[in-house]
Image (cartoon, rainbow, N blue to C red):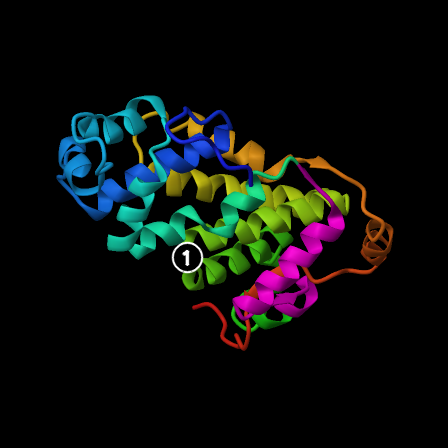
Amino acid sequence: MKEQGRGRPLKNQVEVIRLRLWYATLKQRLPGTSDYALDHLFGPEQAPETRRETFSRIRREGKQPPDQVFERVHRRLPEMQAFYTSPFWAAVMMESVSLWCVRESLEEFLIAQNLQRWNCSQLRLMLAKNIKPELIDEPMLYAYGFKQCKAKLLPLDLLLLYTLLAREAALLVREPQANSFQDLLHAELGDYIGSLISDEALEVPELLYEACCFPSHKPHPADSRVRAQAFYELPAIILPTGLHTTPR
């Protein structure tokens, strides 16, 4: 990720969204704290006369503060650093993606989060114990997997997972899967961002959704091998490892 210069407005739309959501998350962590109070808590120590402008400029202009501001916030609130440096942001800021890179990132993520792939047939058999088989269609199976992952993962980890799944399905030219993952991702982005900011509630999720799902594809030598596997039904539904229960 290319570093932005200190104090300059962020030009990349995703960078601007990340900063706005970082600010909104900080305000949630410290409810009732004004921009002026935030400036005195976390503003640049070397410029007290302009300190009061730091957080109001983030809010009004999307202007990136000095690194020192991030460091002071993250020292007091480590969860804010986890938000700002989440792999989700690096993934959606990529200008191009290859099928090989998506597959590699996805498999690493599944291992790290103790998740596993299921195919539709496996999950149908499991759910048929409590639900009539004729009522179980593929969108329902994807939604079930999403619900299980949402209960396990942090919000940005969930968004990263479904960004990778949507990209993988699209690059494998599996439109039904891609559409299902994109629909789930779109709804979750709207809910998540809406829980943090009320203004521009429609514009921000749409901008981020575009970055998640539609980066340009850059061919990789391994892509032909990975795409050849699409001849078989590669397991696409993600569930926590060891899940053996059925929904009530």
Q: Is residue 160 visible?
A: yes
Q: In this view, does 74 lie to the left or right of 151?
A: left
Seen at 30% across and 37% down, the residue is 23
Is residue 35 depicted above or below 84 in this figure? Answer: above
Observer-nearest of 3 and 214: 3
For the C terminus, the image quarter is bottom left
Q: Can residue 184 be seen in this view?
A: no
Seen at 57% across and 35% down, the residue is 211
Q: In this view, does 185 lie to the left or right of 193?
A: right
Is residue 181 depicted above or below 127 in this figure? Answer: above
Q: Position of residue 57 (x, y in %)?
A: 28, 25
Q: In this view, does 48 lie to the left or right of 161?
A: left
Amino acid carrying mark 1 in the image: Leu
Observer-nearest of 182 and 67: 67
Q: Position of residue 174 (x, y in %)?
A: 74, 46
Q: How crowded is mark 1: few (under 14 residues within 10 Å), some or many (20 or more)?
A: few
Q: Residue furthest front?
A: 46
What residue sits right under mark 1 in the picture? 154
Range drawn in magenta = 96-124
Q: Under tag 1, what secondary structure? A: loop
